[in-house]
Amino acid sequence: MKLRSGAQVARFANGGVAQNPKAFQAIAEHNASSPFLMLPQEIKNRIYHFVCGGHMVHILQNDSNHNHVHGNDTAKLSHATCIERVPEEQIQKEFDSANPDIVSWNIAAVEDRHIVCHQRPPMQGKGPKPNQLSLTLLRSCRQVYLEANMVHYTNNTFAFNCNDILERYVRARFKNKQNLVIRSLYLDVSVSHSSSVSAWSDSINKAILQRLKSVRCLYLNITQVYCTCSVETCGYEGSEMTERQGKMFKKFSKLPLTEATLVIDDRTFLEQVKAHGSWGLYDQMEQQYRWTMKQKQDFSKEIRNTLLAREDVEKGK
């Protein structure tokens, strides 16, 4: 049997197409005899979760060559399921438990964790793509669609590494109120200067605090990159930037969070300085602007303590 498109099923389910009474009665009788549809709703919900949920879903905005496109609303949004096997909670434990007396700057576990997820998937023939959500079940019949059409929003973590993609994705789902059922977010926030903090801060206000008010789980990754232009122009001054980033992330305390992680990746912090072969300048800039492991851990615990308002974060539990 050929499956109908998702749009067709949605139109039928939402009453957008006139229904023939006899055909509707035949469908109802068929559904009543379906072993799957006769299952208790709790069991069906578990099946829907296993089929459509349990993933981190990276939202991408790429051109035809699969290169990231920034600030272009005409580029098609796509997605890729995460292939990173280590959960964010485990990475947080490794980050918190690192000994700052031994680890001066950072731990390898947090570096470029999801970079492979954004690369072009391998070419393949027809059939389901291994890095795509399988939503075929929703196209099987109207009853299944009505029961499960929000499951993939409720039971997956949506990941964004660009603030304009975050705004565009959420804006597109505001009309059908799909934004109201999103429960889990992963944000890779790249910080290089004050303007990047301002851009992310604005997007957090518009997309998350105003439209994703049901988020319960928040996973934060800060990617710190030193901007090689003058400190006076970019405003990358240690204490000032710490304060700006702190204010930005503490905004999430307005959400009903039950879980939050925050790790810092600065592997490429002074990559541009290295590229120019300025090793003397590199050492100077590293000592002046790069956060030590202890500073990263303290910042992370302070933010999580504020977001969750509980003492176990400070204790590292």
Image (cartoon, grey):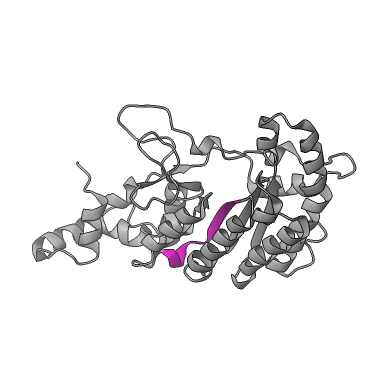
Q: Residue furthest right?
A: 101
Residue 105 shows up from this direction = no
Residue at the image point whose x is 76% and y is 62% from the top:
302
Q: Is residue 84 above or below residue 236?
A: above
Q: Give, as a single range, the part of the protein colored magenta.
A: 179-190
Residue 236 picture quarter: bottom right
Q: For the N terminus, give its image quadrant.
A: top left
Q: In screen coordinates, is 215 left or right of 123?
A: right
Residue 210 shows up from this direction = yes
Residue at the image point whose x is 76% and y is 44% from the top:
94
Q: In screen coordinates, is 68 left or right of 114?
A: left
Q: Where is residue 261 in the image (x, y as percent from the top left)?
A: 67, 55
Q: In screen coordinates, is 45 left or right of 218?
A: left
Q: For the C terminus, give its image quadrant.
A: bottom right
Q: Does the magenta stretch include residue 115?
A: no
Q: Position of residue 190 (x, y in %)?
A: 60, 50
Q: Does the magenta stretch include residue 183?
A: yes
Decide which of 160, 12 is in the foreground and name it: 160
Residue at the image point whose x is 78% and y is 59% from the top:
239
Q: Where is residue 185 in the image (x, y as percent from the top left)?
A: 55, 56
